[in-house]
Amino acid sequence: MKKKKILVAISGASGASLGLKTLSALDESKYEKHLIVSDHAKIVLNKEQNIKLHKNKEIYASVASGSFGVDAMLIIPCSMNTLAKISCGIADNLISRAASVMLKERKDLLIAPREMPFSTIALENMLKLSQLGVIIAPPVMAYYSEQSDLETMENFMIGKWFDLLGIENNLYKRWKDQDENEEL
């Protein structure tokens, strides 16, 4: 069985470790995993995780070609700069180029903008991308899954992102119907 190719990109927003956790949550037996890290994300990761990572200047990398066949791309977190570039069709680095390829190939692209509050310009960029089929899914938790710590909150968000892309997972407690005999 051919493995699906999943590309995770980390742009320079706080929460870069969430992108790494998303990548590591993918089952290696089912998915071929690829990672792009922007220069600004590298700085954030160095501050948050003390990890040395590759640069985002390899615009000629395999994932920048439609013929390579990436099945889905997640940008977690997505900075407002990266969001704006993708929305305007600017492909000046590997993340924005790979996202451009996902759009032209009509492949699954999920963007997790990490900003609060969103400016009107950012919301307009998200609307434009959403109308093109991009999944806009900020890292937002829900209370029904009873998160008790940061790890369960992150697992919930990653699980929801995977659900949106059809990636099987058991990362969070799902909503259940109330028992018939249970009183409200």
Image: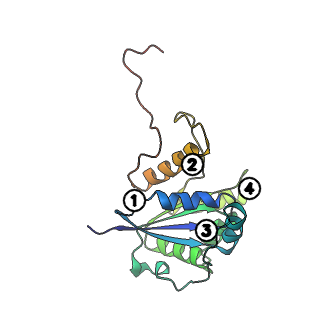
Q: Compare marks 4 and 1 and give the one earlier in the sequence.
A: 1
Q: In front: 46, or 133? A: 46
Marks 2, 4: nearer the viewer: 2
Q: Compare marks 2 and 1 and give the one earlier in the sequence.
A: 1
Q: Compare marks 2 and 3 and give the one earlier in the sequence.
A: 3
Residue, disc 4:
119
What is the three-letter code of the residue carrying label 4? Ser
Question: Helix or strand or loop: what does disc 3 sit on?
Answer: helix
Q: CA distance from mark 1 to mark 3?
A: 30 Å
Marks 1, 3: nearer the viewer: 1
Q: Position of residue 38 (x, y in %)?
A: 64, 73
Residue, disc 1:
27
Q: Is residue 57 toward the left or the right of residue 119 in the image?
A: left
Q: Compare marks 1 and 3 and give the one earlier in the sequence.
A: 1
Q: CA distance from mark 3 to mark 4?
A: 15 Å
**Rendered-image quadrant of the N terminus:** bottom left
Q: Residue at x 49, y 48 (%)?
A: 160
Question: Helix or strand or loop: what does disc 1 sit on?
Answer: loop
Does residue 28 appear in the picture of this structure? Answer: yes
Q: Tell me, yes or no, whether the two marked residues, 3 and 4, touch with CB atoms within 8 Å.
A: no
Q: Tell me, yes or no, whether the two marked residues, 2 and 1, touch with CB atoms within 8 Å.
A: no
Residue, disc 3:
87
Tag of residue 154: 2
Marks 4, 1: nearer the viewer: 1
Q: CA distance from mark 4 to mark 1?
A: 36 Å
Q: Tell me, yes or no, whether the two marked residues, 4 and 1, touch with CB atoms within 8 Å.
A: no
What is the three-letter code of the residue carrying label 2? Glu
What is the three-letter code of the residue carrying label 3? Ser
What is the three-letter code of the residue carrying label 1? Asp
Q: CA distance from mark 2 to mark 3?
A: 27 Å
